Amino acid sequence: GGDSGAGNVSTIFESVGAAGSLRFKGTGFKEPEQKPAVDVAANFKVKPVTDRKDMENTWNPKEGKLKELVDFPCNFQLKVVGARQGEFVEDILDSVGNVVKLNGRDFPHSFRDLGQWRSITIKVPVQSAEELYAVYEAIGKDPRVKFKF
């Protein structure tokens, strides 16, 4: 008998269950059950970025949020990252000091160098949100400053 090994192709496939898994004869592909998605919106709703007013003008005193978030007067810790050129630390301390009418070089501060950047952390005694905004504005006038927060 010349065709003992040969048979109809689909019969061979069925016998090994190739239409489904190799264990079960021809069960076919079954989609995995979908678990219900967790409804994150149930707890809180995040506005789409276009609707958010709190992200823009963070440092704008006219519609700033610092008054609500910080108790003044306080020692406010701010961080400034800028190009490591010249007397960057001293210049920033002087700008800040000029705004709050104190010697900025006396403020507790530290800095780290990260490649071409220098990151300064300063504790600034501020009396009001307006004064803090003025500090940020003064820092922003230095062309070396990349970030301030």
Image: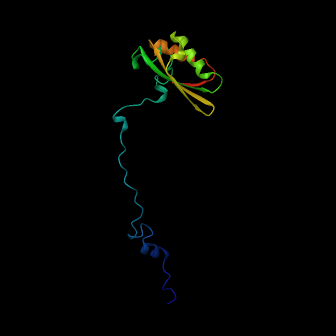
Which percent across, then down, holds residue 45?
A: 38, 31
Image vertical order of residue 84 relative to residue 127, above or below: below
Q: Of 116 and 65, which appears nearest the observer?
A: 116
Toward the right, the furthest residue is: 86
Residue at 51% across / 16% down in the picture? 106
Image vertical order of residue 51 relative to residue 19, above or below: above
Quarter location, residue 47? top left
Quarter location, residue 140? top right
In the picture, measured across the screen, residue 106 lies left or right of residue 116, that is left
Residue 17 appears in the rendering: yes
Residue at 52% across / 13% down in the picture? 134
Residue at 65% across / 23% down in the picture? 86
Q: Of 99 and 70, which appears nearest the observer?
A: 99
Which percent across, then down, holds residue 83?
A: 63, 27
In the picture, measured across the screen, residue 20 lies left or right of residue 97, that is left
Question: How many numbered circles are shown?
Answer: 0
